[in-house]
Amino acid sequence: MSVVTLEKCRENIRKQLDNVVDFWLKYSLDRVHGYCLYTGICLYCYIVQILVMSSFAFYFRGFFTCIGKDGKIYDELKYVWLQGRQVWMYCRLYRTMDRFHKPEILEAATVGGAFLRKFARVSSSSGQWKCAFCLTRDGKALKVQRTIFSECFYIMAMDELSRLTGDKDMQLEAEQMMEQLIYWVQVDPSGLGRPQLPGEVPINSLSVPMMLMCLVQQLTEGRGQEVAQKYKELGNWCVEQILQHIQRAGTAILENVSVDGSELPGCQGRLQNPGHALEAGWFLMLYGAQSGDKEIHRTAIRNFVELPYQYGWDKEHGGLFYFLDVDGHCPTQLEWSMKLWWPHCEALIAFLMAYSHTRKPELLEIFSEVYQYTFSHFPDAENGEWFGYLTQEGKVALDFKGGPFKGFFHVPRCLYMCERILDDLLENKD
Amino acid sequence: MSVVTLEKCRENIRKQLDNVVDFWLKYSLDRVHGYCLYTGICLYCYIVQILVMSSFAFYFRGFFTCIGKDGKIYDELKYVWLQGRQVWMYCRLYRTMDRFHKPEILEAATVGGAFLRKFARVSSSSGQWKCAFCLTRDGKALKVQRTIFSECFYIMAMDELSRLTGDKDMQLEAEQMMEQLIYWVQVDPSGLGRPQLPGEVPINSLSVPMMLMCLVQQLTEGRGQEVAQKYKELGNWCVEQILQHIQRAGTAILENVSVDGSELPGCQGRLQNPGHALEAGWFLMLYGAQSGDKEIHRTAIRNFVELPYQYGWDKEHGGLFYFLDVDGHCPTQLEWSMKLWWPHCEALIAFLMAYSHTRKPELLEIFSEVYQYTFSHFPDAENGEWFGYLTQEGKVALDFKGGPFKGFFHVPRCLYMCERILDDLLENKD
């Protein structure tokens, strides 16, 4: 890729980001009784607000996330992972990119955050706070997962929002939820609600240290020495846990390993998820760059970026597989061979970041290949935003823009990260 | 289809059934230390047995169900749904078909049953018996679902096995588990372990009354008036619950409805599962035929057999879709457009039974279409048994013969049912 092509690439990415931000602002905000927060168009709401002294959440109830290909809402349920991620993304855009420093982004972030704060948490039987996985339109908990991920995205949203509002309580709340999360992961998981069964062995699933590492980076970024110190040990623990997933003499990243870092038997032990490995790769690369640990940085690129591409890329049809079995058995996940949008987002960030850190042309070449596949398959030129789920052959298999797991997150985060990396690259051409 | 074609069809089905029975006898029995129960080949086991006075389960530990395309075990976990179903199927074949009245079938059934009885049940916190969903190879519980289905297949296995062994305790145990199941479904589901959440509304999911109806038929078949009387009310309740799924003026079968039989909002409410509807169809047809209720019988054929075929059959590529949305939105299940083996099994039974009960040629024509698609796509001519999961276009997407949800059940039950129906049809040609 030449400088000219990189320029074009940045231009395209910038346009895509604008398009995706517009799409979600237009369709996903749940404005009960019509928009009325600042414009006052809906008099009914205004009167009701005064009468019942209700909070913002009364008339702006978070985000719809089940959005059809043309923007139509096909389900009113509100998925908490996606509420948290959307708040985070809006804050990040507002806070760090001039062209998104606009009142409508600020409003979406703060009012979405208020909805999340008001409705996401449900107290569990152990007296600990769990976040729901799914809420009804008006915020009633409908489903609670027995994992840590709703809480992770809650923390991301609260921390990022506190940076925007300067609200210390919110920052404290994020840190308190983080404490609880650490307790579940490192001390006692029983608060998550899963009964301990005799056949179960504790496992180290890549998604857990990966998410915790992401949260450490989130909570400490620019917060000064004290906060950095507070999470330093946890950060190191995450790195150690992530590195345990390098298996088979460095030739494979396995999604699940035992807690002492050895291979597990059966499908669970042989599972590979190239998208997760790539995502962990750029988290680890950031950690290596920030801490100055060159060895970690090299490992991140070699084992978590180049390697997952090597085994995860479909040589016949292009694109990254969703799941693989390291021994070549057929995975039991029905969707194993599908091409999902998010592993491609992670791959774009990982390869562009790896290139920008090393300037090795082979990394840029792979970025270019992933870029070609991604931009010729996922974006919907007709209605905007991206499709999320393709068949192995690259045909659109599910045509909605938002669903229970696809929201305003992977696409804009990828475009945002890539645009910033390209800005740096193009400013320092030589 | 002429009589000659029906003869050919029966011949093929018979061969397929033999092939499938052989495949699972050959590969799925977990013979720890080699086979030794009757043959005494493995002296080691024999000595150990005497030394530790262990039960049968010591050296024959149920069934492997994760079986690759060529018969290789790719995971040693034992899924309880599939253990129960396999025991049931062996008993049924042994008990009702002369050519399967063989010692190896009897042994597989009884020793598989002993494993199930010894290891499947785990006591829950409420003091009720739950069955695990998944066990380790040596029978330790690894996962417990918060639904009723493991228990359903446990009951099916125990009841059918008690018919073979004449063991009254086993029959009693099946009926006791059934009582508990009825309590969970009709009185209080809290023993299943799901916390009640404020956003949840109780739903009538087709699979529940369908399974209960299947169990009523299982427990009462040939047991005399007293048992029939005991479950009569429940049978009627199941019919009523199933009929609630006929929605939109009889033009749709919806998978989930409210407990008062109205449509639910969102994806959940619009979901259609043609395979389930067809399966409920032949359960209902049997009920109608046995009870002499002609109206139910007509409804079964019209609404639960013909209708799901009409909306569920893929006009472009052939085969039955796995999931659909009644309003034509894209389902959120990633596998919605895949062609799974089991809906085709249910369709074969449903259409052949409907034809044999009515002799309407259009029903035989659809049977013939489903038969053509099924037998040209699913059976593996090279290694035996059937593939389970095809892409929308009919390509094999997952190539294993057994997995967490595919065992020795839908294929042999379909072949067994169809062979028997064809026997009747061909005996009474005119």
Image: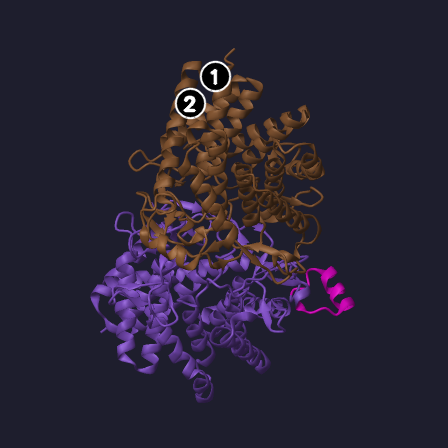
Chain colours: A purple, B brown
Q: Is residue B414 visible?
A: yes
Q: Residues within 10 Å of mark 1 (few under 14, many from 20)?
A: some
**Residue linked to disc 1:** B426
The reply to whether residue B378 is in sight is no
Q: Which residue is mark 2?
A: B10
Report whether A187 appears left or right of B66. Answer: right
Percent coordinates x, y for residue B94 in the rendering:
47, 34
Which quadrant does the N terminus of chain B fall into? top left
- Give me the chain letter of mark 2: B
Question: From the viewer's perspective, is residue A165 above or below residue B140?
Answer: below
Give the residue at x 42% y 74%. A213
Camera-side residue of A48 and A211? A211
Left/right placement of residue B18 relative to residue B350 reads: left
Residue B99 versus residue B182 in the image, above or below: above
Q: Position of residue A86 (x, y in %)?
A: 51, 65
Local secondary structure at mark 2: helix
- Splitting the image into 4 quarters, where does residue B273 fall? top right
Q: Are discs 1 and 2 located on one and the same chain?
A: yes
Q: Nearer the viewer, residue A345 or A288?
A: A288
**Chain ID, mark 1:** B
Q: Secondary structure at mark 1?
A: helix
Residue A53 falls within the magenta-colored stretch: yes
Q: Position of residue A124 (x, y in %)?
A: 62, 69
Residue type at tag 1: Leu
Q: Main secondary structure of the magenta part?
A: helix
Q: Earlier in the sequence, mark 1 or mark 2?
A: 2
Q: Magenta residues?
A: A39-56
Q: Are marks 1 and 2 in contact (CB under 8 Å)?
A: yes
Which of the pair A256/A176 is nearer the observer? A256
Q: Is residue A247 magenta?
A: no
Q: Which amino acid type is shown beneath numbered disc 2?
A: Arg
